[in-house]
Amino acid sequence: MSDSGPLSAGADLAARVERWADRQPSATAVAFEGVEHTYRAFADQIAATAGWLAGAGVGEGDRVAWLGPNRPAALRLMLGCSWLGAIYLPLNSRLAPPEHQWILDHAEPRLLVVDSTFERHAASIGAGCEIRALPDEPECPSTPSAPPPRRGTPAHPVLLAYTSGTTGHPKGAVLDQAAMAANAVNSTHAHDLTSRDRVLTTIPLFHVGGLNIQTLPALLGGAAALIERAFDPGQFLDDVEQWQPTWTVLVPAALTAVAAHPRFATADLGSLHGIMTGSSPVPTAATQPFFDRGVPVGQIYGSTETAPIAVHLRCDEAASHPGSCGKPSTMCEVRIVSDSGGDAAPDDRGELWVRGPSVLREYWRDPEATAEALSDGWFRTGDVGHAGDEGWIFIDDRRKDMIISGGENIYPAELEEILARSDLVAESTVVGVPDERWGEVPVIVAVRAIRPAAAPGTADDAEIEAADLLRLFDGQLARFKHPKAVFWTDQLPRTALGKVRKHEVRAMLNENHGVHRAG
């Protein structure tokens, strides 16, 4: 055991990994690119990382940002922050420099740690803080002779996760160590997770889904985690056959990609107890191929603000409750609130509210958004659903206006803010349309600005202007957020107060009536 003092019942998250290192030092904790780190080695690496951070001046309440692909360093940094009482800030590595700039200006981290492949990107941001590159695995900071004192407690904030905002800027959800521990309990009960389990992580660790549905709960429970830099369907099948994981998480788009792989029908999937999915509506077509192969698919419902597990459908329940996302998780209460403010009757729709120790404490430096989202400890999800007599919950609609494409959240307001600065359109909006590969993709519906007529013999103005419109997003937003097409219309339907009626816009697109596609 590292020389860090006694481990109290209310110890930080890193101390829980240390306890497993003391109990099963030679068991695998993390595997990555052919290298397996035992619990003893991984716990020592966490201690070394905590010392490295302390040497950089990181202390209680300081933010430490991380920018890079999936690798064990992300987990070491988060757990090193938990040791010191600091706050870990994972950056979505798919964002563009202006998006990273806004987050860093808002969060004001003391330190930005980057993977070597992101050094040039980080230099272009102007982070306003010290930037340090972290060497590739399996290298890590050398173990200090005396680890720093433990400062972290369950009450300390430990994760600052930015989620897309409806106002065009992301909001930073603050989760404390107690919330992460409570979420691990929810995960344990959702999976019947034990120290004998092996989880395969392909979802980005900058998402609470990648970090908290299985990966961190596995490490807090003595299980093993195989980390992949990025998802690839062929590599996924190789991992399942060779590493023999018992659990994994795949978003619906990834389920579809794996099932479409030429080797899916013959690959050995026998080690899997099940697969968890979520983050967007889950079509039967995405899950049925796995049921047909004898691998049940359960569901997790939640959000960044709920750490994320709030409702879960266990794999042994999935076949008998199609379409449901499950029942409230062990450490959560869930209400379905009607428009009148009371609890909705069975089968009636209402907004889902979640309460419990895994819910965020606040939005970072945003008291107005915090007050709007939290009511007497209840987090108002903005999602609409219903529950039957037996309490099985169904999600009927998602957060207003949000588009989920390949498991990534896209809020139209971010795109509409860029469109509003263009003289190519008189008015515009962004909505999601169904897509076979990604589930949904964003598209622009716009009214063209009045422009001089084109000279005879020139290309179609609509096509030229659509291409120009789509180029506006280059370098401004991550590629996955870019609109995929432009639909021109004569006018946008609006309310008496001037707000675009997006449900009518989507209906127009479904009927393809009164709109012309370009791009």
Image (spheres, grey):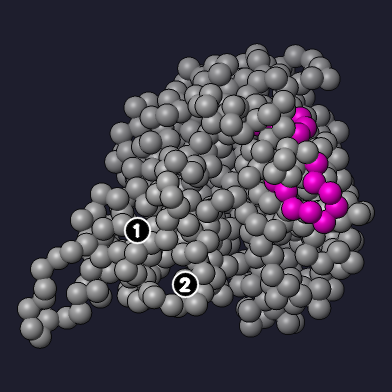
Along the line of sight, which residue is nearer the eye, 469 or 345?
345
Residue depicted at 82% across the width and 67% down the height: 322
344 over 487 or under it: above or below: above
Q: Give the residue type at disc 1.
A: Ser
473 over 505 or under it: above or below: above
Quarter location, residue 290: bottom right
Residue wearing tag 2: 509
Q: Give the residue type at disc 2.
A: Leu
59 over 16 or under it: above or below: above
Q: Provide the residue span drawn in magenta.
A: 343-360
Residue depicted at 42% across the width and 56% down the height: 494
Question: Badge 2: few (under 14), some or many (20 or more) residues near its Cα, within 10 Å?
Answer: some
Q: Is residue 361 magenta?
A: no
Q: Position of residue 383 (x, y in %)?
A: 66, 49
Quarter location, residue 429: bottom left
If the image is split into quadrants, where does the N terminus sit?
Answer: top right
Can residue 1 be seen in this snapshot? yes
> Main structural element of the magenta stretch: helix, strand or loop?
loop
Answer with left or right where residue 287 lies relative to residue 78.
Answer: right
Determine which of the numbered discs, if any, sits on residue 428 in the image: 1
Secondary structure type for disc 2: helix
Along the line of sight, which residue is nearer the eye, 417 or 245?
417
Along the line of sight, which residue is nearer the eye, 496 or 421?
496
Determine which of the numbered discs, if any, sits on residue 289 in the image: none
Question: Badge 1: few (under 14), some or many (20 or more) residues near its Cα, within 10 Å?
Answer: many
149 over 88 or under it: above or below: above
Residue depicted at 72% across the width and 48% down the height: 350
Q: Is residue 350 magenta?
A: yes
